[in-house]
Image (tube, grey):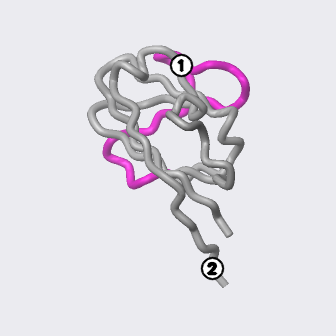
Amino acid sequence: MADVMQPLGYYRFLAGDLMSPIGLAAVPGGIPVAANAVMLTVDGSAVRFRDDGVPPDGGTGMAIQPTLNPFLYTGDLRAILFIAPSGAVLHVSFYQVL
């Protein structure tokens, strides 16, 4: 049986939000309690992330390109940090994978 993904919410980080490292805990209301996955998409320019306890910068971290299909992240939602030095928008949908 395939995993079922229960949607729990959406947030959009604007370019100004992403000028310095920011995590999902910055979402108003915080990370939904049951969330254990996020679907990420990017508009504009690449967004970089790290989830190893080190903040990303303009040259380090994994890049999510705006041309990519949505990226499913199932790691520690409290550990992931994002940055985008130029005008990117990061769309985040929270899910509980059952």
Gap in angstroms between the C-alphas marked 2 and 1: 34 Å
Considering only vertical position in the picture, is 7 above or below 52?
A: below
Residue 35 drawn at (x, y percent):
64, 53
**Quadrant, the N terminus:** bottom right
Which residue: 33% across, 24% down?
15
Please give the label number shown on residue 2.
2
The magenta region covers: 50-71
Residue 73 drawn at (x, y percent):
59, 49
Q: Specify the amino acid type for callout 2.
A: Ala
Task: State yes or no: discs 2 and 1 in contact (Cβ < 8 Å).
Answer: no
Element under label 1?
loop
**Residue 93 within the magenta-colored segment of the rendering:** no
Residue assigned mark 1: 21
Please give the label number shown on residue 41.
none
Which residue: 67% across, 49% down?
33
Residue 86 drawn at (x, y percent):
32, 19
Q: Specify the amino acid type for callout 1.
A: Pro
**Quadrant, the C terminus:** bottom right
Return the residue nearer the eye: 45 or 29.
29
**Which class describes the residues within 10 Å of circle 1: few (<14), some (14-19), or many (20+)?**
some
Task: Name which quarter of the figure residue 87 lies in.
Answer: top left
**Residue 65 within the magenta-colored segment of the rendering:** yes
